[in-house]
Image: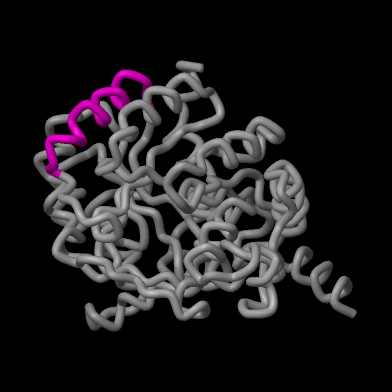
Amino acid sequence: MKVCLRTLQSQLMAQTPWGELPVQDAHVHFFSYKFYSALAQQKKATNAEALAPLLNFEVPAHDPVALADHWTSELSRFNVKRAALIASMPGDEDSVASAVAAHPDRFYGYFMLDPTQPDALARVKRAAENQHLHCICLFPAMHTYSITDARLVPILEVASDHHLAVFVHCGAISLGIRKKLGLPSQYNMHYSNPLDLHPVALHFPLVRFVIPHFGGGLFREALMLADLCPNVYFDTSSSNRWIVYEGIDLAAAFRRSIEVLGIQRLLFGSDSSFFPRGWHSTIFEQQAKVLYELGLDAQQASQILCSNLEEFHKARKRSE
């Protein structure tokens, strides 16, 4: 029965309100075995496998390629052409690079970096030489630093020279997996304002910056940033619970973003992460419905749902 249900979902997902359209996802977390092992150490659990009954998640095999295979199969069910896989802990870029190497036409490789660590620049230099890595992910509130910190200058110089994109998490940050495990999340929202990125984006005009979740509750500030900096993009991922802070709905968020950024700087994202849930199809359905109701035609919808992400990474692909 479960298989039949997923087959039905696949058939439904292949048909958007405009008919069948290709999809690329700008935001899928790659929860590797190494990621679960790090959580197990913090939880003082025996090993990564011990987290499975606590989370009701599937803990993947040691080999990240097996997880990549699983994601490939999952995305194929839903007619998703390609996805950005985010290595979701600092130091795990090798896991996502292996995944992308196994399926280079299905994934882009994103990796989390903590620039306060002494090996941060060396890691970025190695990543810049790896054709399977496409984007640096920065979480200032998580790692408690300002995006204007001088330590980021050489990192962003490498990104600019090698056409690496840079993802900057702003606004509210809450990790459900840590909550389920009862682990603390001592983040500092002082470092979450999108406006902090303004001088940085101006100084590095060749770097393509992406702000996930429409700014995560600092939507007005994110709009101001993007209006002033044409190299700033939004990804539309997550349940977007942040809209309760703004007093708007998802349709208004899309409408205002299109007015300020234009269609070409919006990247569809689902914020998918764990199995057995797999690809977060409900997020897609909600966003496709909103775009249709806003009056976008099939070509415009296809830009947001697919081709914008491909264009976003073209400079990096040309440099490979």
Range drawn in magenta: 148-163
Instruction: Estimate the x, y position of residue 135 in percent, counting from the top left.
Output: 42, 37
Name the quadrant containing residue 174. Answer: bottom left
Q: Is residue 268 left or right of residue 248?
A: right
Residue at the spot 37% in from the left edge and 43% down from the top edge: 113
In-front residue for pair 222/183: 183
What is the total number of numbered labels drawn onto the structure image?
0
Q: How is the image coloured?
A: one colour
Question: Residue 159: within the magenta?
Answer: yes
- 181 shown above or below 295: below
Q: Answer above or below: position of 220 versus 168.
A: below
Relative depth, front residue between 207 and 129: 129
Rendering coords of residue 165 (x, y %)? 37, 35
Q: Tell me which residue sits at (22%, 54%) in the image.
A: 260
Instruction: Please give the name of the residue rendered at 14% of the width and 64% of the height, measured from the top-left corner.
Output: 190
Residue located at (20% from left, 60% from top): 192
Is residue 173 on the magenta stretch? no
Residue 296, how many percent across, how many down?
Answer: 45, 59
- Residue found at the far left of this picture: 199
Where does the image place residue 96, in percent across and percent down from the top left? 58, 41
Q: Nearer the viewer, residue 283 or 132?
A: 132
Q: Is residue 215 left or right of residue 87?
A: left
